Amino acid sequence: MASKSLFYLAFISFFPVYCVSQNTGTYFPFVQPTSCNQTAFFNSASFQCNVCGGNQHRSQSGLQCICNPGFNVTDLGSPIVKCSYCTGVVSLDQRRCLQCTNENCACTGAGQIQVGNMVDLTVTCTTCPQTTVGNPSGATCVLCQETFYYVTGNCSCLPTQLRGGLCFSDTSSSSSSDTEPRNSIWFQSYLESGFLACTIYNNQTACQLLTNMVILSPGGMNSKAYNLYKKASQTTPLPFLPQLFYSSDAALPLGQTAPRGLTFQRNTKINFKVVKFDASGHFLGWEDVTGGTLQLCPDTQKRLNAAYLFGTTYQQSCSVQVTELLRRFPEPVFYELFLQYQDSQGKAMVWPVPVRTLNQQTDTPGFSRDLRRFFLVDGLTGRSGSLTDQPQYVTYLSSLALSINMPTGTPGTLPPFQLTVEYSKVNDPSLSPAQILFAVTYSMNEATMKRDTTIAMGVLGALSVLLAMLETSSWSRRAGQQYITLSTIVKFIAFLIGNLGNTFFLVTFGTGIYWLIAFKGQRTTVDIALPSAGGTVEMDFKIYLYLAFAFKALQVIHVLVVQVTISIFFIDWEKPKNTTGGRSQGSSVSAWRMFFVANEWNEIQTMRKLNPLLQLFAVLLILQVIGVENIAARDLNLAVQPGVDNYLSPWSPILRYGITASVWLAVGLVQVLFFVVIYERVLEDKIRQFVDLCAMSNVSVFILMHRCYGFYIHGRSVHGHADVGIDAIRANLRKEEENLCALRGLEANSDIQTFEFLLTEKVRYQLDRIMLPLTEASGIMNRRAGAEGLQEQTMKAFHTMNRFLSSFFEHVHKDMDYIVKDKLLLERVMNYEFQQPIERSIFYNDHDGTVFSEVLYYSKEMTLLLFDTLLFCIINLGTQNLVLAAILTYVIQQGLQWVRYLISRWNLASKTLVDECFLI
């Protein structure tokens, strides 16, 4: 150790150490080796220019200092050398001063060269053979390595002092209890010599070599290489030891080391640079990062370059034969990644990008967990017998992910750019393929996003509860419930589920639309990134979407259950015609009118305001054929047809849902608008036509949706009879056109035929008494067909119900009377009746004429449209196939419609006594 200390004193006296300094890991000016002035060299450890010593100037490469003419050099591997003035002549290798045998030390003869005698340090002139040129091989004595002279003064070196072809006076400092990679000839030959040459001789290449070995070492931060590096870093001074860790302050957030004000325009190239070193530690220079510089997977140059377009999320994976990797990288090349930018004065600056190596995580006190250096392929460490042997194993970069944290202009605790690498080892390079992943991801602080979503969910969720309470209260009034029962709780849950389904849909749909506008709409500076793939915001979004679909599906089931369990009665106002003797016969009243009305009612059960097939074809046309689905990619492009040679980023589930749901809803709403505004007014309005059919058939329809609530279609003919010939029907219609008869309405001088009503308990009780035989008959029918008197009992109940309802609407029963009124505006808005039917039932005028469609698909179009939207989007997100999603959506739609139709058909037949064979 004493000799080592003496060497440091001598080294300090030879070389001015104030001129070199290590970088602290923050940004600094960008410097090329050849841009240093003639009296400075490029320090490949700090990437800055350092001043040479006296009588020295920059070499042609710019990486070290060389002595001026007339000076010999003492070079132990440091860029800063010792120069001594020669009174004679300098040897051709500039390492020795030689004495001349003639007066001017010049060789004037033709073909003569200077030949130095390294034994007596003299120089003579000799003539070269004609077949050679100056200084042919073997014509001069060649000096041995400089370290031999430094230690022993000659070309001899003891085996205990020899390490890696260099001679050292003391090798004890390289001893360590740790072991290098087993059977690695590279580590066995050069690890200790690299450490000793770096610490004793300040050899810059050796310092780089030692740093490379730390990166190569499978043991990472528990290896002998790292322990030697740590010991070297504690040696003072070592100006040429590269910085292994990104920062020497582990408590300092990496974001605070980054420059401020970094801004990028959309789709501009990120100007990355790498500095490269070979395995021996030689500086290979700066290189611009383009497609293929760090990507091991092959592809077209245009696709590879897309990785560095700002705002483009990039992902590339492949399987490559290890032999191909070794062909491209016979020896490992080491990289340090930098971001190049211009400061406020327009000066070119570089900022080192921190590298997080998943295989080398450490909690080294005083240092950050991020490194500065990485490699792509290592086939050198696995060589055992000789450096020319085939490697027993190969280590390669299996995953490289560049993370860009937004906004880059004002970084927080995270750096704006960060590289995460992971290595894998293949033990059989000739057979095993390498699985490689390269990715570029963008992220930003998701706390604000999550908070805003939570607030929206809280507010809308509270409104959903209040709305469910209002709906439950309305249902309780309509069902005649005076107390909270189990059915009340079940109804509250059903209403709440439907409202929460709407809430989750609004939140997810609003989220999708917001990110479409906020992310894709960035025109100049890009400072917003999509939620990270697999992050908390995206996971919450998926959960909300699944809940929206599940709740909406339950709401649809609830709607279907209500619609298929209604009680419906047909009131036949037709009176039997008088025959002989003025006596009437009931058989003279035709039943075909009622069958026709029942059949038409059955047909409009599942009628919708949109065409499902047209909906699917239009959506597929827009999304897939036109290519609108391509906007869902995680990039800033808005091209619907990007081209086959362009790179298409992975799609975002939030954007994909936002686009898909928007297109589906837009097409659906256009269909509904066309149906309501044009089709129903110009071509066909089946709902209102059904009301006209009832009036022409002299049949009214009485519908009970809940126990005391329902709808009434007044179909009593103003002409007295409807069971007449075609001539009479045409004459009756002509009278109505010419206003020669009364209006069709329930009340005098009114043409309103449709109503919603609330019944008193007394009316409801009377209906239950009449329907009791029908219920019992239905039970008998289920148990035993052909029971005695079943048909007679059923018909008797039917006629009793017909007579009661007819007399009820004719105000015959004074104790069960009703009033007709308009609903208040607030009642219509809230779908809630403020007045309770205590003494008289209440009938509310329906000026639109479609209120009874509440028990049909027709009035539930928005619920069905949202269900279809969520169904299509869920399948699309799961399968990533629009055609398959369209097919499955159509099959499920038709399945639900078929089930709804069959059950409603059975219910209609059982409640109206119209046999199913007449419902065609």
Image (cartoon, grey):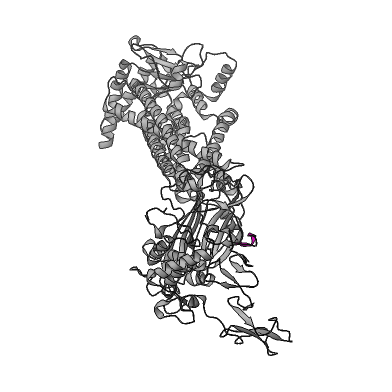
Tell me residue 892's x, y (percent): 43, 44
- In this view, the residue in front, 85 or 326, is 85
Q: Residue at x 47, y 54 (%)?
A: 246
Judged from this view, the residue extending furthest toward the top is 814
Q: Does the magenta stretch include residue 667?
A: no
- In this view, the residue in front, 52 or 411, is 52
Which image quadrant: the C terminus?
A: top left
Which image quadrant: the N terminus?
A: bottom left
Left or right relative to 111: residue 851? left
Q: Which residue is drawn at 61% across and 84% down?
A: 122
Look at the picture and state if 172 lies above or below 342. below
Q: Can residue 915 be seen in this view?
A: no
How many numbered discs sit on the rendered protein?
Answer: 0
Left or right relative to 389: residue 106? right
Q: Which residue is drawn at 41% across and 36% down?
A: 552
Tell me residue 433's x, y (percent): 45, 68
- In this view, the residue in front, 517 or 705, is 517
- In this view, the residue in front, 319 or 784, is 319
Q: Is residue 828 visible?
A: yes
Look at the picture and state if 784 lies above or below 226. above
Look at the picture and state if 545 lies above or below 80. above
Which residues are drawn in magenta? 33-40
Q: Where, by quadrant of the figure, is residue 675 drawn?
A: top right
Left or right relative to 403: residue 344? right
Q: Where, by quadrant of the figure, is residue 767 drawn?
A: top left
Tell me residue 398's x, y (percent): 45, 62
Tell me residue 266's x, y (percent): 60, 46
